[in-house]
Amino acid sequence: MVNADPTLVPGNPDTPEPAPAPGTSALYRRGAHFRRYRASYLMAGLSIAAIWGAVGGILLPLHVQQIEFGHFFTGADAGADLQSLTALKYAVDAGSTVPTADQNRLLGLLAEFEAARALGLSSIAVVSSILTMLIQPIAGILSDRTRSRWGRRAPWIVAGAVIGAALLVAMRFSPTIGLLLVTYSVAQLGLNLASGPLNATVADRVPPAQRGSMSALSGFSSLIGGAIGSIVAGALFAVIGLDAYFPFVVAVIVFTVLFVLLARDRSSRNLVVPPMTPKQVLVSFTVALRDRDFRWLWIAKVALLFGGGVSGAFGIYMLQSYIRPGLSAAEAAQISPLLAMAGIPGTVVALLVAGWWSDRVGRRKPFVIGSTFLIAGSMFIPLLSPTLPALFIQGVVAGVGVGTFLTVDQAMFIDLLPDRDAAARDLGVSTLGGNLGQALGPLLAGVVVAVTGGYTALWIVAIVIVVIAALLVFPIRRVR
């Protein structure tokens, strides 16, 4: 039987270190409690990340595509084949085919459809990211101050997972872009209510010397969960269509509840929290950003996620309309997860090595800077060769950079926290940086596609932004 409060077991070698203040979590030393925490943390993280991979990467773009297709291809055009039309467009652009009047009309519809689906998807991504950006630090400060028998984080983890799951069900039945925007945005809010406090448990419970390795596990769950989610969603979409939302609903509820039960925290009922006015709450969000080094790392994260958001906003659409030859929607749904999988071996190695190596040498900056330059360099590959093999090679190279960045950047933020007792609040602010970048990326990407009529310029813009992100890390002083 799992002991409800392992800190109360005298003489137990697995007993965590005493908590630094009443109502706060205790640091783990080693042993069964720490192993149970790591295992359940990994599964909860995987279940949330799987939704980002499945919904954000596969189901949402295809859902938007279905809605927009019905707007442009109606009546006799309802049976139009996007793959054939895209091949015709390539042939016309190359000068090898002269289109008929009807083909010209269909190509005009294709151009309008491509701009509409890009802007539709980017608008959903932007609005949901902005709302998430606003809720993360608020959820963080609320969880920092929560009193409950289950600790400060557990109520938010479970409530957020339930809200997110309920809205995923609502997404499945959303027939318009507007309704899809609302349901996805609220689902994102809920899931971020869960993931923010979940990530804060690392700062609460893991000793400094092991945070790099634990951040590697966190990065592993984010990346592998996203890849697993996209693979499962791609396979299920070919069989059950948009009903593929449902398995992820079940998984996120099950694994977040298991985390709370198996890695039960100390009670926070006796937590001492000073009263705060709304103005003080708002001002408190600026505490971390008033720290010079934290601010530089935050801006760098905004820039990196901005660049990544530009290049990755339309992965499914690039498979259909950028590479040559283009793929069908069903083929793109199945190939897209394989692209994510291509980078996993390098990412796993980077996750395992970078966190351990960073802890061992006591340095973070070289890993963050080097990984960011590597991500930028990988983007030249599909820019110079718009083919499916080039996208696979880019994924392999970028995977090493992403694995290193996910591990060490998180550890570096924890090292730079100005107030350990407000870890969730300030880590929420760090996540806000990522959300801001992710919001700006699709917005700019949608505009670029609408203006240029294609996807080539996305790679150029992304490379410039990611290089800037690497340069922004150099001024940080407090962490080497």
Image (spheres, rainbow, N blue to C red):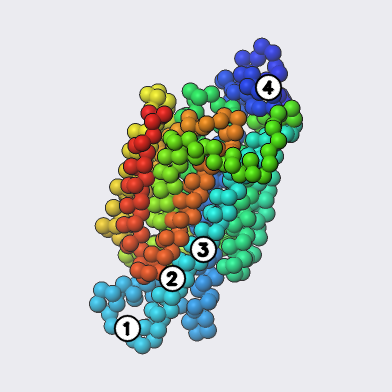
Q: Residues within 10 Å of mark 3 (few under 14, many from 20)?
A: some
Q: Between marks 1 and 2, how big is the CA–CA gap?
A: 21 Å
The answer to whether 435 appears left or right of 176 in the picture is: left
Q: In what element is the residue under mark 3?
A: helix
Is any atom of residue 145 visible in this view?
Answer: yes
Question: Hey, what amino acid is under mark 2?
Answer: Ala
> For residue 123, which numbered disc appears in the image?
3
- Quadrant for residue 243, please give it: bottom right
Q: Between marks 1 and 3, how big is the CA–CA gap?
A: 33 Å
Which of marks 3 and 1 precedes in the sequence?
Answer: 1
Residue underneath mark 1: 99
Front residue of 166 and 275 = 275
Q: In what element is the residue under mark 4?
A: helix
The answer to whether 330 appears left or right of 39 in the picture is: left
Which of marks 4 and 2 precedes in the sequence?
Answer: 4
Front residue of 357 and 75 = 357
Image quadrant containing the C terminus: top left
